[in-house]
Amino acid sequence: MESRTICFEPDDRYNAFLRTCPTAPHGEGQLAGVAIAVKDNISTRGIETTCASRILKGYVPPYDAHAVSLIRDAGAAIAGKTNMDEFGMGTSTENSAFGPTLNPCDPSRVPGGSSGGSAAAVAAGMVPMALGTDTGGSIRCPAAFCGIVGLKPTYGRVSRYGLIAYANSLETIGPMAQNVADVSLLMSVIAGPDRKDTTSYDRPYNHTPDSDINGVKIGIPKEYFGKGVDPAIAESVNRAIGRLEELGAVSVPCSIPSMEYALAAYYVICTSEASSNLARFDGVRYGPAADTKKSWHAAYQDVRKEGFGPEVRRRIMLGTFALSAGYYGKYYAKAQVARENVRKDFTRLFADVDVICGPTMPTIAFKLKEKSDPLSMYLSDILTVPVNLAGIPAISVPCGKVQGMPVGLQIMGRPFEDERVVDVAYAYEQAVKV
Amino acid sequence: MIDAEVIVGLEVHCQLDTKSKLFCGCSTDYRDSGPNTHVCPICLGLPGTMPALNRKAIEYAMKVAKALNCSVIEESEFARKNYFYPDLDKAFQITQYDKPLASGGHVEIEGDDCRERKIRLTRIHVEEDPGRLVHMGNAERGRYSLVDYNRAGIPLIEIVSEPDLRSPKEARKFLNKLRATLEYLGVFDSEKEGSLRVDANISLKGSERVEIKNISSYKGVEKALTFEVTRQRNLIRRGLPVERETRHYLEARGITQSARSKEMENDYRYFPEPDLRPLRVQSWVSGIVLPELPDARRERFVAQYSCSLNHARTLTGELRMANFFEGVVTGERKDLCGLAATWIADTLAGELNYRDMGIDAVDPHRFGSLLRLLKSGTITDKSGVEVLRVMLDEQMKGEKIETPEDIVGRLNLAKTAGDDSALMKSVAEVLRDNQKAVEDYRAGKNGALNFLVGQVMKKTRGRADPGELNRMVVSALKGSE
């Protein structure tokens, strides 16, 4: 199938890649010969896959993630594996065990995260497209910070098989590219059912972006422009919404009251699931081996203490706590209620509007090491996590600059209406194209 | 307090006999294969893999639920049971927690009071088996242990009973009934090593409950519980409290031993498995066609073959034995059913048990020939047992297999005819040599007759028919008066 190769030896000055494939084989098809970067938490047969963690150093998957099989079958060349926050836990790609990725728009700033490597590789022009993953904003945040396009598909529309789980009920694989058309193209390759992922749906994506958005109703939630959101960002996004209105869209103010608890619910759910997902990394089957001279539990402790970075350990502990006897009802069960409320809010809003728009991130990309305390980092996910809690599609498309740094317009849609958010993004992109 | 009632509840784990594992396509036929040969990325729990539910396993579990009168719950759910152990590939087991597949139901057993008793069930749920550790040396002092994931992902059902059992013997009967039912359903093979594991909760009324973990044989359950009843009664007798704890059953020594307290502190942090959708299968129940189950077959055996209730119970208590019985009494051997019931349920079962042999090793036709020899009066019951033993021993050693007729001929076991002068001669000799007994008989001591008959039996090595011999001795005694 993969009969030819491309040569891929980029100048990776931003540390976007954890490893590259200098001679990347490829086949024929829709993506023939296209170099695609793959986030390092997506399994690639024969290519080391570490989730940017020491605990998976040396792990070479014996199988391809379903999405990777699909892009290989479409003729793409796997150019390499991109840097990320360890296991996807972060918003800056600084939590990589192998050093941070720098933002190509300003190397003193972070590229966002956790798919920072994929975003930087695309933004720097090293590859035209990349696969990222989005658990609480991990595709949309770096897309916004680096000035590219990133789509978080509807939950279940792209198979998660082979995506090394961080928070199964929230995350998805999705396309990242320099423009909406490429995002849409990559989405058409990776979407569809997979019998190995029984949470996937038989909803293929066969869509060519259409810039006609006349009559589309856009909800503008006040929470996306309120406290904690940089006014300059809000202004930039409001201008973008103005452009959409000029194109025939109708904007409607609205409110998502459940957002008050969304962030807390998100962090309880993702850490709970993570504490279970990451328990298998024990040095018995892969990664750096456990010391067999010690008793197994002592060896496990050593492997896990040395293998996981501080943010991962923090989240494992938080999640373990949230699921513990006596606390489950207080945390995990409550978070599920809050999650349900977010879903209900979106369902209610989408009865009236076709899409919801707001900023992707409350600020521009932060300086490296600027967010040193975990909580302030967590707070920057406030505008992206509601989408994951509800399982709906959302895209981030560049909409101007603040202090010379890109700003992202986030467009959220009804479940399985990924096509519509792509169309609105495409309409905006085409309208502002110079 | 010392005579306090025994209260037992069981949690029975049975491997479902599907072709492939619960969440991947790996074959379940691993027992004669090398370690880690029946594995794939999914059952090894490699990063990024996801479980895909085996529909067959759910169908099998639902057959069990229907057969045991349980209600299948409208929406059930898989959950993760989180704990660290090297044989657990994902560091969690996918099982069911607060939304099991089915709840309620009951199993009927013959209680210790010989009356039918309904043992209530709490629930049935589906889960995956973990892998297996192979200790080099032993678990405590061995140099290292190896892990075999062949077993990881084998589908299990856990059947949980209410604390309705009142003795170790009832627990055994409950298990036997359960095994029979599952085998009749074709979803379970009790002869596969490790296919059944039991956790037992036992208390004496008014005292704390003790959990005995991981008993892996049918006999083991009765033994472990018997040991535990004695241990707990002894404690109470000495005025000591029974502590609430988990104990392990040490099969080789037949005792239970307190588990380290650390193992009890596990908090499994259950939560719904996010990689599997909830299960909505209640509508399948009506489509499940159950085969004839042990109780129905037992009643049929009584009606069709005129078996005694006890024989019918024994014969139908194991699928293979019931099938064997019916294999023996087919066609021209229909007239043998009375004899077959006795000889299979009483004699053959005991001989097989003694040799640790399965009934599948016995050829129903050859066994039928043996019964024919008995029926026609060619050999005595005693010789019949001898022939059967030779047959089984030959089978076991894999030697040339003789027909029962051959064995009778070779060992000269054919019944001595009533008018045989040799037999008359033996009778005369016995009477001559045991004058004391003859006198006792004449003095009215009946025991003396039995003694004399026994002596003749001994001389003729059991070939004489006991009834006939009795008559001969009596007439000889009369004749010599």
Image: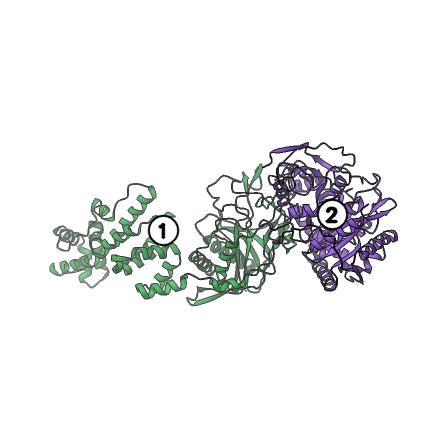
Chain colours: A purple, B green
- Up-down: is A50 above or below A155? above
Q: Give the residue displayed 48% in from the left and 55% down from the top.
A: B221
How crowded pointer 2 is (Cα within 10 Å; few <14, some 14-19, many 20+) is rated as many
Amino acid found under the numbered disc labelled 1 = Ile
Q: Give the residue displayed 22% in from the left and 62% down from the top.
A: B446
- Residue A103, how many percent across, how many down? 80, 40
Between B13 and A423, the one lying in front of the other is A423
Res A47 quadrant in image: top right
Task: Give the side of residue B267 with respect to residue B167, left or right.
Answer: right
Task: Give the side of residue B44 with respect to residue A306, left or right.
Answer: left
- Residue B282, how many percent across, how many down? 54, 63
Residue pointed to by mark 2:
A180
How crowded pointer 1 is (Cα within 10 Å; few <14, some 14-19, many 20+) is rated as some
Residue pointed to by mark 1:
B359
Residue B243 in view (yes/no): no
Between A385 and B356, the one lying in front of the other is A385
Residue B82 in view (yes/no): yes
Q: Quadrant of the C terminus of chain B?
A: bottom left
- Up-down: is B426 above or below A50? below
Q: Chain of mark 2?
A: A
